[in-house]
Amino acid sequence: MRNRPVAVLAIALVATLAVLPAGAAQEADALFAAVQESDLEAVRVALDSGVAVDSKNRYGSTALFFAADRGSAEIVALLLERGADANVSDTFYQATPLVWAMDNGHTEIALLLLQHGSEGVGQVLMQSLQSGDTATARAAIATGPLPRPLRDQALQIAEDNGHDALATDLRDAAVVDAPAPAPFVFDPAQLPRFEGMYRNEDAGVVVEIAAGDGHLLSTSDDVTVAYAATGPNAFAGPQGERLFFGGRGGVIEWAQLNVGDSNTGLSPVDPDEADLIRLGDAADESDDARYAGDPNSEAVDGWPSFRGHDGSGSGDGKDAPINWDADSTAGVIWKTPMPGIANSSPIAWGDHVFVTSAVSSAGDNTIKTGLYGDVAPVDDLSEHRFFVTAIHRTSGAVLWERDVYVGVPMVKRHTKSSQANSSPVTDGNVVVTLFGSVGMLVAFDFDGTEVWRTDLGPLDSGWFYDPDYQWGHSASPVIYDDTVIVQADVQKGSLPTAPNAGARTATRSRPGAHRWSTVARRATN
C-alpha cells in the first residue's frame, strides 16, 4: 500500500508539470513517465539523451522520489549511479526519497539511499525498531556513524525489547556528537498563520486562536492563555501547556493541545462555519428556529442541486427533522434500497427525488473513511453500471431507473470516493447527471426520457504529486438560466469541446498548475 510521508496527509487534487523551459520540461516528463512505468530501459534512454537526473517538477520532486515510492530498486540504483541527490527534499511535503521508500515498506531501497549519502538513518533505524525489523535496523547501523542521542534512544528500545544482537551493534557503533542547535528566533509576522477556530468534536473542545503582541492567545471556555513560540510551529503556555501545529504547503491542517497528561487533537474549523458557531453561542434558544425551519422565512421549492438552491445549503421555510433514526425507522417515512455505492447527494423537485449510483461488476464496494493518508486508488476497472433513479418523494416508490452508461471506468477512484460522486441537478424541466470517470453528461425529462447526451471524455482527477494515482472527479454540474456548467479539474490538457451544435465550451487555465476547465451547454437541447 502506498502512503503519504509520515506526518502529512495527501488531500490535494491538482496535477503539475516540471518548472523548466518548455523543451527541458518535455524531456523531464519523459524521464518521470519512464520511472512511473517502472521502465528501466526507458529511464536509461532518457538519461543517455541528456535529461538531467535531478530534473524537478513544480514541487521539487525528482525521478528518485517516484522510483523510491514505487519500489523500483534497479531504477533507484541507476539514478544514484548517475549522480541523483539522495537528500533532495520536495517543497510541499518537505520529504526525501528515503521517506517515500520507508513509508511504503521498501527497506532495501532505504538502505541503498543511506549507502549513497542519505541523512535519514534515524528514520530507518527507528521505524525498523518499531516494527521489529531488526535485520534492517542492524543494516542501517552499519551504514555509518550515528548521532549520539539517536544511538542512546535506539539502544534503550533494543534493550527493553530483548534485541540482544542489535543492542550489541548499537553499543559498538561509531557515534558523533551533533553541534549545538542555533538559538531559535521566531518571526512575529508568522502569528496570523495560526489564527482561527479549532475543535475536537468528540471531546467537545473548541479553541479560538488569535495573534497577540509577539505571542498567541488561546481562548477556551472563556479562559485565555498566552503562548510563547518555542519553535516554528510550537508554543508553550505559562503553566507548561503546549500547542503544536502542522500541515502541508504552508496550510495549517491540524493542531494538538497538551495540558498536563491530556493531549487533545484539534482540527481547524472553516471560517464560515466558525462564524455560525459564534452566532449560535451568542444566540438565545429561541433563535434556534432558524435551524429547524423559520416560519417567517420565504419557503423554497425542492432541493435542486448539490447543497440546494444556489449551492447555499439553505432550506429556509422547510422544517427539518429534529429526531430520527434510520435503523429503528423512528421518524423515517420510507426506505428504498439503492445498489452500488455513491458519494453523490439526492436532489428533489416536486414529487421526484433523483439519485445516482454506480455498480461494480466485481462487487468492490470498498469505502474507507477517516484520516489515514493513503493515496493509492481502488484497483477496480471492471465493468460498471452508471445509472440514475427517480423515486416518489412521499411513497419511496421507484418511478423509473435509467442506465447512463455501462462499461469500464476510464479513471480509478480513491478509497474515500466512488464512481458516482457528482450530484445531479434539475431546473424542474430536466435532470442532468454527470459521471466523470466515463465523461458522460446526460439530461432526462421527469418521465425518464433522455433529452440529450454529451461525451466530455474522461475527467481524470487525482493526486497532484503523481497523476498515476487517480482519485475520481467529483464536482457537480450546475444550471444557470438555460445553461449547464461543469467544473472539470483534470490532470492534463484542456477539456474537449462537446460534439454537439447546441454545446458551448469555455476553458480557463491557472498559470503554473493543471488545467482548470469549465464546459457549458444548453440545458434543454
Image: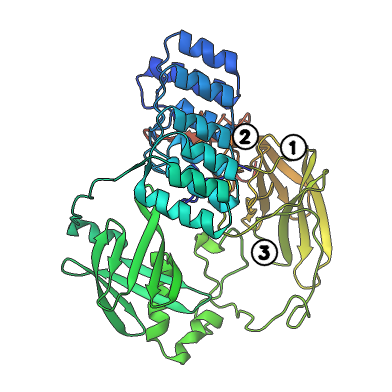
Give the labeled residue for mark 2: 456
Query: Which of the two residues, 424 or 50, is positioned nearer the viewer here?
Result: 50
Please tell me whether mark 3 sits on a helix, a strand or a loop: strand
The nearer-to-camera label among 1 and 3 is 1
Looking at the rendering, which quadrant does residue 411 occupy? top right
Give the labeled residue for mark 3: 348
What amino acid does circle 3 point to? Ala
Looking at the rendering, which quadrant does residue 322 occupy? bottom right
Looking at the rendering, which quadrant does residue 486 occupy? top right
Q: Tell me residue 96's x, y (percent).
A: 43, 37
Quarter of the picture holding the C terminus = top right
Please tell me whether mark 1 sits on a helix, a strand or a loop: loop
The nearer-to-camera label among 3 and 2 is 2
The answer to whether residue 109 is seen in the rendering is: yes
Give the CA distance from mark 2 to mark 1: 19 Å
Q: Tell me residue 161's x, y (percent).
A: 57, 58
Quarter of the picture holding the N terminus = top right
Give the labeled residue for mark 1: 381
